[in-house]
Amino acid sequence: MKKICSVFLMLMMICGVVGVSAANGDVIGQIYSTDILAYINGKPVPSYNIGGRTVIIAEDLEDSSYGFAFGYNDAERLLTLDMYCTMPWPTEGEEIRRGIPGQVLGQVYETDIRFLLNGMEIKGYNIGGRTAFCIEDIGEISGSPYEEYGYSPYLCNYVWDETNRTIELRTFVGNVFELAKETPGFTYSLSGDQLKVDYGSLMSPWSPALEVKSTQNELTPVYLTVGDGTAADKMPVGLCYQEHVYIADMEAVKAVVNDARPELMSHDAAVQYLTGLAGYTEDRRMENGEYTVLLLRKQGAVHPTLYAVSKNGGYAFLQDFSEYGAEYTVTIGSLEGNKFQITLYPFAGPHGATTLVTEFDLEQCLYL
């Protein structure tokens, strides 16, 4: 009899365990207020406490200024967050006050919604129609394939400051555009793990700072090659993920890049170079004691491409009208000192067709 009772009790215990298994919508805990201030890459974000850990709300990140793309598909019961790999945009009134520790704010429910961050599944908590997730979960680097680089599998890490009671979620952020901005005249291209730097952009100094020829779908070291590789041959400079490049020591890389900056062509050499470009003919030339403005016509084009050449050396791209047809009127102004003006009509304005007037200050142009 004792044996039968023991078996019966064991079955009851097993059934009890099965019986309390949480189903979608069941209450599985509580969410509390917290005196911990949370940040994402320095931007304040509301935070809460679930089970002694700090959580933030996915729906709060629908505000793209945090640097995430938010998505939800109700048919698939799927919530997604994907990082832009950029720093968040600051907004006014961002101060968030500390909460009162331990104050119950609501219930935590079991959910059947899948939650993906950068394509990888993470644990989400239903707190009454919104989804919370834990900073410590997505920021833990121990055991990560990117541990040596200081990142979790979700390309994050976090910093806890016990003294100030703050926690900051830090995501992978590219900064190659800052490098391009501070090294004018150079263009960058990313192919695999190689960041190649070349001097000079013939057609436009406003071309994209980074041309991506291929992407890495995992976090890898990135190596710098300047020009033909003689200035820096496979110099490790940081990390890349997809089309995003993070430069670890910006000042050191800027020094290497700027050391490769060649001397400017002389005025005569620059004029000879531009007027000798294959597929172009010289249409018109304007000149004063400081500058020469060249109007070059691309073969088959109705309107010209404009360059300025400095008497101190070097040439600068001004504007390319070669893609505009005969239905457009381009008017070339005169060269007066260091100022030069051109107009284009018709140009699409907010209230219909208008005339676009562009004035160049040739002293401020980028000369190559």
Image (cartoon, rainbow, N blue to C red):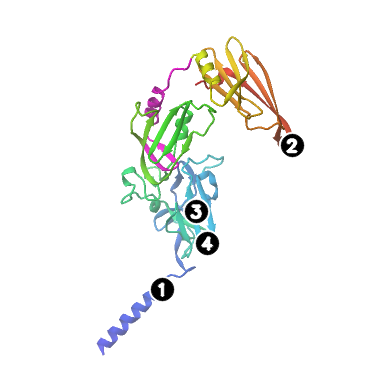
State which tag comes first along the sequence, 2 or 3. 3
> Marks 2/3: CA distance?
42 Å
Rendered residue at 33%/43% (across/down): 149
SS under mark 4: loop
Please tell me whether mark 1 sits on a helix, a strand or a loop.
loop
Residue 224 place in picture, x, y as percent: 37, 33
Please state the extent of the stretch shown in magenta in the rendering: 238-265
Q: Secondary structure at mark 3?
A: helix
Q: CA separation, marks 3 and 4?
A: 13 Å
Number of numbered callouts drawn: 4
- Residue at which label 3 appears: 58
Q: Are the residues at dot 4 and dot 1 in contact (C-beta closer than 8 Å)? A: no
Q: Label for residue 20?
A: 1
Can you tell which quarter of the image residue 331 is in?
Answer: top right
Q: Please tell me which of labels 2 and 1 falls first in the chain.
A: 1
**Callout 2 environment at 10 Å: few (<14), some (14 to 19), or many (20+)?**
few
Q: What amino acid type should be assigned to the residue bearing mark 3?
A: Ala
> Marks 4 and 3: in contact by CB < 8 Å?
no
Marks 3 and 1, the one that precedes in the sequence: 1
Q: Residue at x 47, y 34 (%)?
A: 177
